[in-house]
Amino acid sequence: MTTIYDRFQRRLVVSRSPSIHSKKLKWLMILPGATVVVDRLGNCECRRRLFHMSPSLLPFGLLLVPRDHERGQLVVSITVLLAIAALSLAIAFCPKLKRPGEKHWMHAVLGYMVPVVVPMLFWSQHYEFGLMTLQILAVGDGSATFGGVMFGGRTLPWNRHKTLTGLACFTICGSLAATCSYWLEASTRPTFADSFLICGIASLCAAIVESLPIQSNDNLRVGITALLAGITMSAFFAP
């Protein structure tokens, strides 16, 4: 029986270079387990995953921002500036980040940014929802790819190209990362348990939407789902 790993390998085979440990990714080989990851995903997909998941580091940098009455506006300004920088990098390195045959790379990039940046601009006093959405997209969605390909497992009944392992990795990793950001930044000062419940439900809803058998890029719908679910749950558990 053809496994999810076999199908993923066939889709990525054209993106691999003759030597999987090319000089362009040589620096990555110093990390534990990196050789196995690059071997299974391929150079192009590894670059794409790194670009996709790197924004998750933003909340750690925000810990250096003073906690005063101007913090909200400062966090939003930093996020917008970094989003512009990321957009510039996405355009500059488009040939190295696009999958073979992909025609709507910029749609994927903008779909990633919109549910994070727009609510922060229009609702700056509750910028924690933008950070929560960012972590679910960056860590949750990124982990789903790694988990599904590295560990395989049973495929989902509604989508044979996705696995239960990927769905679980999305939900668990996305929940943990989003909870940390939401709990630290929420103006309502919820408990950690309430924060985990809010972000866990948001991450689960986003993971289910990501697993649906829809051909178009899922960044926008996954991000919007996470955002709306988080806002809805917070109305009950962190009013």
Image (cartoon, grey):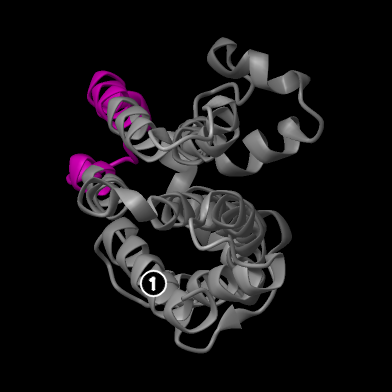
Q: Position of residue 175 (x, y in %)?
A: 61, 64
In the picture, measured across the screen, residue 66 lies left or right of residue 164, that is left
Examine the structure image and report whether residue 180 is included in the region drawn in magenta: no
Residue 148 or residue 115, whichever sits in front: 115
Q: As drawn, which residue projects farthest toward the right?
A: 32
Examine the structure image and report whether residue 95 is included in the region drawn in magenta: yes
Q: As drawn, which residue projects farthest toward the top?
A: 23
The amino acid at mark 1 is: Ile
Magenta residues span 83-109
Q: Is residue 205 above or below residue 83?
A: below
In the picture, measured across the screen, residue 193 lies left or right of residue 32, that is left
The residue identified by callout 1 is: 231
Instruction: Check disc 1 and report its element: helix, strand or loop.
Output: helix
Q: Position of residue 172 (x, y in %)?
A: 67, 66
Residue 74 or residue 167, whichever sits in front: 74
- Residue 74 picture quarter: top left
Q: Look at 46% across and 76% down and name the residue there.
A: 239
Query: Label 1 crowding class (10 Å Cα cut-off): few <14, some 14-19, many 20+?
Result: some
